[in-house]
Structure formats: structure tokens, C-alpha cells
Amino acid sequence: MRDRIFKIILKRLIYSILMILVLVSVVFFMMYLLPGDPFQQYYSPKLGNDLAEEIRSEFGFDKPVLVQFINWIKNVSQGDFGYSIVYKRPVNQLLNESILVTLSISMTAFILQILITIPLGLFLLKHSGKKIDLIIDKLALIIYSAPSFVVAIVLIYFGSIVFKIFPSSQMISYNFYEMSFSQKIVDLLHHLTLPVLTLTITSVSFSIRYLRESLINVSNEGFVIALRSNGIPEKVIRRKHILPNALISYITILGMEIGSLLSKTLITETVFSLPGMGKLMVSSIFTRDYPVIVACVMISGFMVIIGNLVADFLIARFNPKFSYEIVSR
């Protein structure tokens, strides 16, 4: 069992790393095909192109593209993502600041999704086929079909504009650093409520439909019918027999949901102007900050890799039937 799981993880890890290298290479070389120049701000009518060319040389952009790429790979292998053209700071510092925000938001939403989905799934199983079950199922389908930024805009409209309860943007208040520790915590939670709620709602809309279907399928299995015929209370059957078996399938999708959740987080951060990787990546694209763009693409790719590896591990661990399919791919 352990050898099979190790084989799965190793195979997918190698494949994923190769895909990241291809993705980063494409992004790196495509940036030079786009119109515009990140050093345009340094051109001066009085000084001519001297200052811009000097700064271009400092960043190594005066070398051939292939040489720049090789040098970048060497630096990244040593943990150095270069220096930001726009922010005038090491890219590592920018990533450290933004990743913390991104992970805190996405992981909070991930945990809330689990805490909401399982009880809601049991509720829908209890009322299977009834009006409330059909309404929630259709509502989940509508939300799942909508892009995450649409859900964010709807929450901003009602939460910030109509009811004026939550801030529509930013992560902290202007006087945050003048507050006491407890006030800072409350202020932070106040600002992050809508972003986390956006991610939680979109994630639950997917996971609840999957868990609901699994619960219904298990409830129609022969062993469940036999338990009912023996007079065991329905509540006991749902909690001790149906739910544990349905969770095996549900657990296997949680790892896949990590990668999806991270991509939604990047979009949500941009909508709410949060200082995470999403906002950093978008601003870097508009300002042509090449070192930051490539670093963000690479880190985002690795985050998705981690999510996929978790998914493969969970599939192999809790649902061995699918592990052979993964190994054979």
C-alpha cells in the first residue's frame, strides 16, 4: 500500500514539476513579445536613454533572452527570485508578504467549507426529495456556475452598499496601527469577512452537491436497506453508516478543491483589493514587472501542485480503487 502511494506521489510530482517549468518558460519568453517597456519610466528628454539603459543593465535585461532565462533558473534554484523593477524591493519579500494573506484567506475558507458541508449534507439527506432539498440543490448549482467575482460583487452590494455592515475593500482600517491588540483582531476579521465568505460559498456550492449525491447513493446500498429492515433508527444509520462511507468519496475531492480554491482566492483578492498574491500579480502585469510576474506564476503553480498531490494521496489512502487508475495514467 505504501509503495503504491509513494509511486503515485512521485510520478505526479515529477510530472507537475515539468509542467511548471514549461509554464514558467512560456510566460518568461512571451513577456518579451508583448508591446511596451517596463523601463519606459526611466527615459528622460534631457538624459536621453542613458539612465534607462543603465538600469536595464543593472537588472540584466541587456543580455539575450535565453541567457536571462538561464540566469533566472540558477538564481531561483538558490531561492532568489530577483529584484522588483517597480517596487524596488527583493521579490522574495513581496512574495512572503502576499503568500501569508493568500494562504490565511484560502485555508480559512477551506476549513469553513468542511464544517458547513458535512452537517448540511446530513440535513439534505434527511430531507431528500423534499422541497428544501431541491431548493438548496438548485441554488448550489447556480452559485457553482457563477464566477467567484460575481459572487463577490453580490456580497459587496448587499453587505457593504445596502446594509453597510462590512467594508468593501482593503484588509485593515486606516487607523489600524493605533488600535489595541483585541481591536486589531476585530478589525481584521471585519475586513476579511466578505472575502472569506465569497470563497466559502463558492466552495460549498461545489462540495455539497458532490457529498449530497454520495450520501444518496450510499443510502440506497443493500447494507443500508438491511439495517433499516432490522429496525435500527434512521438517525443512527445516517450518522454511523451512511456518512462514514460517503465521506470516503468526499475526502478525495478535498485535495482537488485546494487548487481550485487558490485560483478563486487570487481573483477574490483583486476584487477586494487585498494585499495577496492576486493583487500583486495583477499590478505586476499592468506595470510589466517581469521578475514578480514569473515568480507569482511559479509559486501559484506550486500551490496547485500541492493541492493535486494531496488529492492523489487522499484518493490512494481512502479509495484504493482509484489509485490503480492514477498509477496507470
Image (cartoon, rainbow, N blue to C red):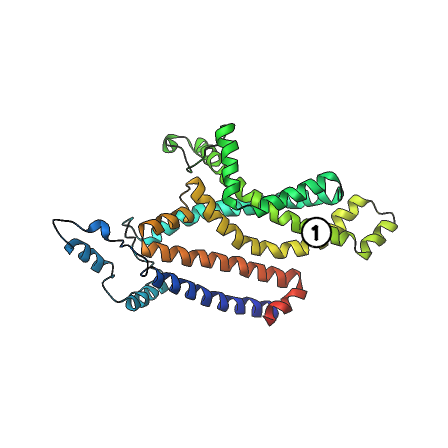
Q: Position of residue 233 (x, y in %)?
A: 82, 44
**Which residue is at 53% across, 44% downward?**
199
Q: Position of residue 89 (x, y in %)?
A: 29, 50
Q: Position of residue 258 (x, y in %)?
A: 54, 53
Q: Amino acid at mark 1?
A: Glu
- Pick the residue in front: 215 or 23: 23
Q: Report the number of discs.
A: 1
157 lies above or below 251: above
Crowd band around label 1 with a 10 angstrom C-alpha radius: few (<14), some (14–19), many (20+): some
- Pick the residue in front: 161 or 15: 161
If the image is split into quadrants, where does the N terminus sit? bottom right
**Which residue is at 82% across, 57% downward?**
222
Residue 145 located left or right of residue 281: right
190 lies above or below 326: above
**Which residue is at 38% across, 61% downward?**
27
**Which residue is at 56% across, 53% downward?**
257
